[in-house]
Image (spheres, rainbow, N blue to C red):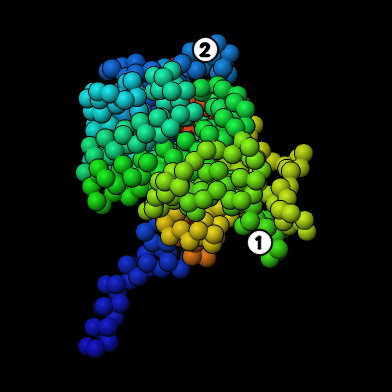
Amino acid sequence: MKLAGAGALAANSAAPAAAEKTNLGDARSFPRDFLWGSATSAYQIEGAWNDDGKGESIWDRFVHTRGKIRNGDTGDVALDHYHRYKEDIRHLKALGARAYRFSISWPRIFPQGTGPANGKGLAFYDRLTDELLANGIQPFATLYHWDLPQALQDNFGGWQSADTAKAFADYAGYVSAKLSDRVRYFFTINELAAFVELGYRTGVFAPGLTLPPGRLNQVRHNAVLGHGLAVRAIRASAKPSTKIGLADNSIPAVPLVETPEAIAAAEHAMRELNAGYLTVILEGRYTEAYLASAGADAPKFTAEDLRAISSPLDFVGINVYTPTYVRAIGTAPGYEVVPFSRSHPRMASSWQAFGPEAVYWAPRHLQKLWNVKDIYITENGCGTADAPAADGIVYDTDRIMFLRSYLSMLQRATAENVPVRGYFLWSPFDNFEWADGYETRFGLIYVDFATQKRTPKASAAYYAEVVKRNAVA
Ligand code: FCB
């Protein structure tokens, strides 16, 4: 009887015990509560660029200026997600991922950047949020993914003025007050360096400016200030359970060879290469090397600015695509960036070198340097030159190879107790890839932009398998 009893007990618990084992013990598994998701941004998918009272954004203006975007593409229609969001959420559900990061278009909510709010704009994000929740998908909202209201560019020169940072905080407070009963996670800004460097230094992104160093440093400062003021505004307005962070594309310094010296050099490089962005946000001061190298062009700021900029965060999100290899050197600054070899493998976007180690080292640096306790990979993915095969399927072998490699390195991080809590794949759908237009495709789901037909690629099945197993597949 005793034996039978024990046997019965064992038989009863056999299934859950085995499931637990795959979640905890497997060499390729992620932690049990690891959050799988995917990410998009408003301008890249929504279309409906002037529907329902939306104001013009700097990206609307930029794409309507001849010669700025490859093939003259625009986001006027994009994926028409604004009207097709229900179908799109069905696709998200089929991937099995439980989280979705989207961005809110500021000029839909405040068409002039400040002033009266546009209820119809907010209503879209209400519908989107409700539909996600009804499908068991947790919404993660980004407040600024680069589509600044054009009025703020016209009136203040955009991020050249601290007035834009203040307007951003007001908007962030307003939206988080309205949505935080259902949206628990907010990101202030997506990729500080991308919109500042490309928008104000090289001019290949909106608003297309090429500012000299002093004015550029002030833009960088106003951007981190906008982040910090928004953190405060969200804390003041949103439900207390709200979690606040950002989605930054910090430069991930990767030791070329993992010697103790190169690892120390990479940690040092991580602080300095990100001094104007993540480092000042997490440390509340600009590094001496940053200020010294800027000299007379250093940004103007107050101690109060620095306090706002370094407002405490609940988590840090990082978008990781490409490594920056470094090695140790005997002279100042103690590290050197190693250029990519001529034959270094690349993905279809010209800027994207292949380097899966980046997704291990970036979060490891966050833990080691700044003791960050909750880290999310808020974007990772690759651009490819997909086309359907004769049978209608897109066999994106390169994307599957890319994901398997990067996820293996991410799994190395979680296995070593680096506190990465979740991963958002960029992107569920092919979309408008900024100055590259529609030619470079980042989606798990192929979009025929002429018909708006969505067709899952081979990589969608791959990602669904990863999510299902909670392990590298
Ligand atoms: C990131 C952006 C995102 C997308 C991917 C490919 O820099 O945040 O909008 O364009 O790159």
**Mark 1 residue crowding within 10 angstroms, few (<14) / some (14–19) / many (20+):** some
**Mark 2 residue crowding within 10 angstroms, few (<14) / some (14–19) / many (20+):** few
Residue 56 appears left or right of 271: left
Looking at this view, is 156 or 409 the one in front? 156
Residue 96 appears left or right of 370: left
Quadrant in the rendering for residue 461: top left
Tell me the amino acid under the disc marked 2: Thr
> Does residue 96 appear in the picture of this structure?
no
Q: Secondary structure at mark 2?
A: loop
Label 2 and label 1: CA atoms lie apart by 46 Å
Specify the label residue 65 is tagged with.
2
Specify the label residue 54 is tagged with.
none
Looking at this view, is 467 or 347 the one in front? 347
Residue located at (23% from left, 28% from top): 123
Residue located at (24% from left, 33% from top): 126
Q: Is mark 2 within 8 Å of ligand 1?
A: no
> Does residue 201 appear in the picture of this structure?
yes
Residue 48 appears left or right of 378: left
Tell me the amino acid under the disc marked 1: Ala
Ranked by sequence position, the earlier of labels 2 and 1 is: 2
Residue 99 locus on image (x, y percent) = 35, 45
Determine whether 35 is above or below 347 in the image.
below
Residue located at (48% from left, 65% from top): 417
Quadrant in the rendering for residue 261: bottom right
Q: Secondary structure at mark 1?
A: helix
The quadrant the N terminus occupies is: bottom left
Residue 6 locus on image (x, y percent) = 27, 83
Specify the label residue 264 is tagged with.
1
Residue 472 locus on image (x, y percent) = 50, 54
Residue 255 locus on image (x, y percent) = 67, 56
